[in-house]
Image: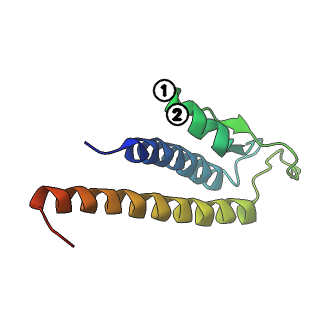
Amino acid sequence: MLDPLAARLEHYLDVVSARQTLVASNVANADTPGYKTKDLDFQMEFLSQIEGAAPRAVEVTGLKTKNDGNNVSLDREARLLAENALRFNVASNLLRSQIRAIRSAIRGDSQ
């Protein structure tokens, strides 16, 4: 019943959720010796989701590595958490407006 935009928003939210999990794991392992930061190529993963593929985490390159081999940057992870929250809010608001429009059509509201 929802249009194709709603299906795409669902896939988008799946990628947002997968990234949130990875960022939380990065933060949790910020002090784990040898831990390497993982992330998603957001655009590529969104397109893969549309085709039905599961998100794949990759190690992030180019980050400063500490003496213990860990390369988690809490500043980077905090930025990604904020970015992810914005992505989630935009997508959930769009989906909510789609559902409101359908409810309105079902009720026969003429607004």
The amino acid type, in three-letter code, at marker 2 is Gln
Residue at the bottom extreme?
A: 111
- In the image, residue 10 above or below residue 89: above
Left or right: where does residue 99 sit relative to residue 11? left
Residue 15 relative to residue 43: left or right? left
The label shown at residue 80 is: none
- Where, by quadrant of the figure, is residue 86 drawn? bottom right
Asked if one can make out residue 40 in the rendered structure from this viewpoint, the answer is no
| Residue under the point 54% across and 59% down | 87
| Amino acid carrying mark 1 in the image | Gly
Task: Say which of 44 and 57 sits in front.
Answer: 44
Q: Is residue 45 something that shows in the picture?
A: yes
Q: Position of residue 27 (x, y in %)?
A: 63, 56
Q: Residues within 10 Å of mark 2 (few under 14, many from 20)?
A: some
> Which residue corresponds to the image point at 15% horizontal and 67% vertical from the top-left?
109
**Residue in view at x 17 percent, y 69 percent:** 110
In this view, the residue in front, 109 or 16, is 109
Position in image of residue 111 (x %, y %): 21, 73
Q: Which numbered marker is on residue 52?
A: 1
Relative to 56, 67 lies left or right = right
The residue that label 2 is drawn on is: 49
Residue 110, compared with residue 98, is above or below; it is below
On screen, 69 above or below 75?
A: above
Cβ–Cβ under 8 Å for marks 2 and 1 = yes
Q: Determine the secondary structure under disc 2.
A: helix
* Left or right: where 35 falls relative to 91: right
- Considering only vertical position in the picture, is 106 above or below 56? below
Give the CA distance from mark 2 to mark 1.
Answer: 5 Å
- Give 64 or 46, whichever is nearer the viewer: 46
Where the N terminus falls, by quadrant? top left
Number of numbered markers? 2
Bin the neighbour count of mark 1 within 10 Å (Cα to Cα): few under 14, some 14-19, many 20 and up.
Answer: few
